[in-house]
Image (tube, rainbow, N blue to C red):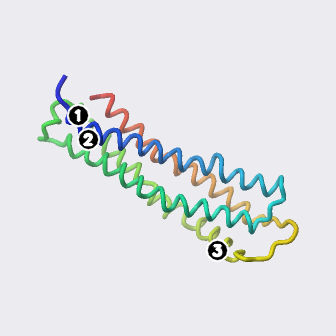
């Protein structure tokens, strides 16, 4: 078996585990957190203004946490693609499709950013506007806003789709590792 530098193996671990973790982190919002918010509104009569603030806090945590993880994972995958380029020392010991797999992994993992901007921005903006409009509103009794619930349900679906991008990146990276 040919020698593979430790930096290459570390980049593989960072890329794959980072992308897989990112996918799970994003998916957990759509599978656990946001459905629990919706449920607390429908079953426990938590008012929509409160739910909107809770959604916004989740959104802000994800917005600050996830892009740096995506960048680190994509950088690791990009390094791997560069390391197996034509003429490199590693090129002779990796399958020919390794560069495509690592490049695909980088693009898919970092793909959460353009996906968020293109597919989710409108929904995000509407939900943020609702949470801002309701900020500090005195709440008495129950209040359910059908538009808010519809927006949150749409966001949950879109976010679930977004979580599949880094998952696919992790899978592409893992396939490249198995081929080595």
Res 96 label: 1
Q: Compare residues 130 and 46 and report the one nearer the observer.
A: 46
Look at the image and tell me in which quarter the C terminus lies. top left
Q: Secondary structure at mark 2?
A: helix
Q: Residue at x 80, y 61 (%)?
A: 46
Q: Secondary structure at mark 1?
A: loop
Q: Which residue is mark 3?
A: 129
Look at the image and tell me in which quarter the N terminus lies. top left
Report the number of numbered marks.
3
In percent of width and height, residue 106 lies at 35, 48
Left or right of 114 on screen, residue 28: right
Q: Which residue is mark 2?
A: 99
Left or right of 81 on screen, residue 170: right
Q: Earlier in the sequence, mark 2 or mark 3?
A: 2
Is residue 179 positioned above or below 165 on the image?
above
In percent of width and height, residue 49 lies at 74, 69
Is residue 154 positioned above or below 139 on the image?
above
Q: Residue at x 18, y 43 (%)?
A: 85
Q: CA distance from mark 2 to mark 3?
A: 43 Å
Q: CA distance from mark 1 to mark 3?
A: 49 Å
Mark 2 touches mark 1? (CB < 8 Å): yes
Q: Residue at x 20, y 43 (%)?
A: 83
């Amino acid at each position: 078996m040919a020698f593979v530098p430790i930096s290459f193996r570390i980049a593989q671990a960072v890329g794959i585990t980072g992308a897989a973790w990112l996918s799970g982190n994003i998916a957990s919002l759509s599978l656990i957190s946001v459905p629990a918010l919706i449920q607390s509104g429908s079953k426990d009569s938590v008012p929509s203004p409160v739910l909107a603030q809770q959604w916004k806090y989740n959104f802000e945590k994800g917005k600050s946490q996830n892009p740096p993880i995506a960048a680190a994972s994509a950088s690791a995958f990009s390094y791997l693609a560069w390391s197996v380029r034509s003429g490199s020392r590693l090129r002779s010991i990796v399958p020919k499709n390794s560069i495509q797999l690592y490049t695909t992994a980088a693009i898919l993992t970092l793909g959460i950013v353009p996906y968020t901007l293109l597919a989710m921005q409108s929904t995000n903006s509407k939900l943020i506007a609702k949470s801002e409009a309701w900020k500090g509103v005195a709440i008495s009794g129950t209040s359910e806003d059908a538009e808010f619930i519809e927006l949150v349900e749409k966001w949950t679906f879109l976010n679930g789709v977004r979580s599949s991008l880094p998952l696919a990146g992790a899978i592409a990276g893992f396939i490249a590792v198995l081929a080595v």
